[in-house]
Image (cartoon, rainbow, N blue to C red):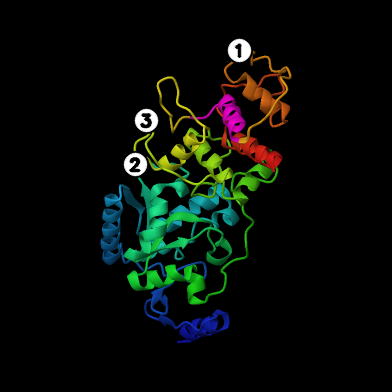
């Protein structure tokens, strides 16, 4: 009874709309307005093991079937987790990143919605780390509530929910409640009148990219504008290669080009490719062309020479035919003028050994630096 009274008192002190709070002493579960609440404040006991909710699974299957009818394949890659499994995941993240960073994207055991059997992590077949821009994400954002699901951790709401943006994490509430939450435009915490669960966290902070990283400011600049995103585990992976698909997405967003779709001539980009609208838009804008075989190579890395070429096309960079100091870029090299342009505009200075390394694949940090500096100069 004391625990129930404490929870009720807490809700009256922190709520903006007096939600009805109930706590079953025997189960240790907290319901607010009939909704089981699990977040950084409320938890479930270690003994709670409901398994995957059958009603939620049925609703997901209906939703997946509807998406399939619209040409989008999706599946749930993570649903119910036991207390022990959540503890294992959380402890591993803490060991790898430290508790402060792990708490941004991983729940402590007892505080994970996955332990309710009502949370579904949803992905699209073939989607890469830029899943936030997949067709499945866009479809879910517009339609999930019709099947009883809400996006649990929206963008720019980390100070409310306590977790970074997770475009894959959906919570089943039932159609009536999900529709009401969706129409309110609020997070579940805001809808129920709960206070923010943690202080705001500056955008662009990643577990593996400290302020001392050479491209930190460029990465934050792009993150602030939602041009570049990180991974589910809170990392940015600055040394990972930038794919041609990622480059196309970032350029389309940086240039604020309206997304279009149509027939593509690339034989390696299918009509149901998750990033087709971005690839089509970037191609139509003249930013990308296929290789000798007509392929776009969506999963291939983008070279430093190719980065110079797409930035030159995107921003109409000018040059005065100043001789290049790079010993590995001859005048007859296909991207010579493009490299001239980014060099003369002081967007790249090359390496200490006097080379430009045009065929080296651009890392995520390198592409972020190239793009951020080009954008800032253009502005």
**Part of the protein shown in magenta:** 301-314
User: How far across and down, in percent of the image, does residue 43 sit?
Assistant: 46, 70
- Residue 366 appears at what percent x and percent y? 61, 34
Q: Nearer the viewer, residue 336 or 57?
A: 336
Q: Which residue is mark 2?
A: 272
Dot 3 falls on a residue whose secondary structure is: loop
Quickly name the residue at label 3.
268
Task: Describe residue 26's horizontal placement relative to residue 208 as left or right.
Answer: left
Left or right position of 208 against 8: right
The residue that mark 1 highlights is 332
Label 3 neighbour load within 10 Å: few <14, some 14-19, many 20+: some
Q: Residue 170: within the magenta?
A: no
Instruction: State which tag comes first along the sequence, 1 or 3.
Output: 3
Q: Quadrant of the C terminus?
A: top right
Q: Quadrant of residue 171?
A: bottom left
Say above or below: 133 vs 308.
below
């Amino acid at each position: 009874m004391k625990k129930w009274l404490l929870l009720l008192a807490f809700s009256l002190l922190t709520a903006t709309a007096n939600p009805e709070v109930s706590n079953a002493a025997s189960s240790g579960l907290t319901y607010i307005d009939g909704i089981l609440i699990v977040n950084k404040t409320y938890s479930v006991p270690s003994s709670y093991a409901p398994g995957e909710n059958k009603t939620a699974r049925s609703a997901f299957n209906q939703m997946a079937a509807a998406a399939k009818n619209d040409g989008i394949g999706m599946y749930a890659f993570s649903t119910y987790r036991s207390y022990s499994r959540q503890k294992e995941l959380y402890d591993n993240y803490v060991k790898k990143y430290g508790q402060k960073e792990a708490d941004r994207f991983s729940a402590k055991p007892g505080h994970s919605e996955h332990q309710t059997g009502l949370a579904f992590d949803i992905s699209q077949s073939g989607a890469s780390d830029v899943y936030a821009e997949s067709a499945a994400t866009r479809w879910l954002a517009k339609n999930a509530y019709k099947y009883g699901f809400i996006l649990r951790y929206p963008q720019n709401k980390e100070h409310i929910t306590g977790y970074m943006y997770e475009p894959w994490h959906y919570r089943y509430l039932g159609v009536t409640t999900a529709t009401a939450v969706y129409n309110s435009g609020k997070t579940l915490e805001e809808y129920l009148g709960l206070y923010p669960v943690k202080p705001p966290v500056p955008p662009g902070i990643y577990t593996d990219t400290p302020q001392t990283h050479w491209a930190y400011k460029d990465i934050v600049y792009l993150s602030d504008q939602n041009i570049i995103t990180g991974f589910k585990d809170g990392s940015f992976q600055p040394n990972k290669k930038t794919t041609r698909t990622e480059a196309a997405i970032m350029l389309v967003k940086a240039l604020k080009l309206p997304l279009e779709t149509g027939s593509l001539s690339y034989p390696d980009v299918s009509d149901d490719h998750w990033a087709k609208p971005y690839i089509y838009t970037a191609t139509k804008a003249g930013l990308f062309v296929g290789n000798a075989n007509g392929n776009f190579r969506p999963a291939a890395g983008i070279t430093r020479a190719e980065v110079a070429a797409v930035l030159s096309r995107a921003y109409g960079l000018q040059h005065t035919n100043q001789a290049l100091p790079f010993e590995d870029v001859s005048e007859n090299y296909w991207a010579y003028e493009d490299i001239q342009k980014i060099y003369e505009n002081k967007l790249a200075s090359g390496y200490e050994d006097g080379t430009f390394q045009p065929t080296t694949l651009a890392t995520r940090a390198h592409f972020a630096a190239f793009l951020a500096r080009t954008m800032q100069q253009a502005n």
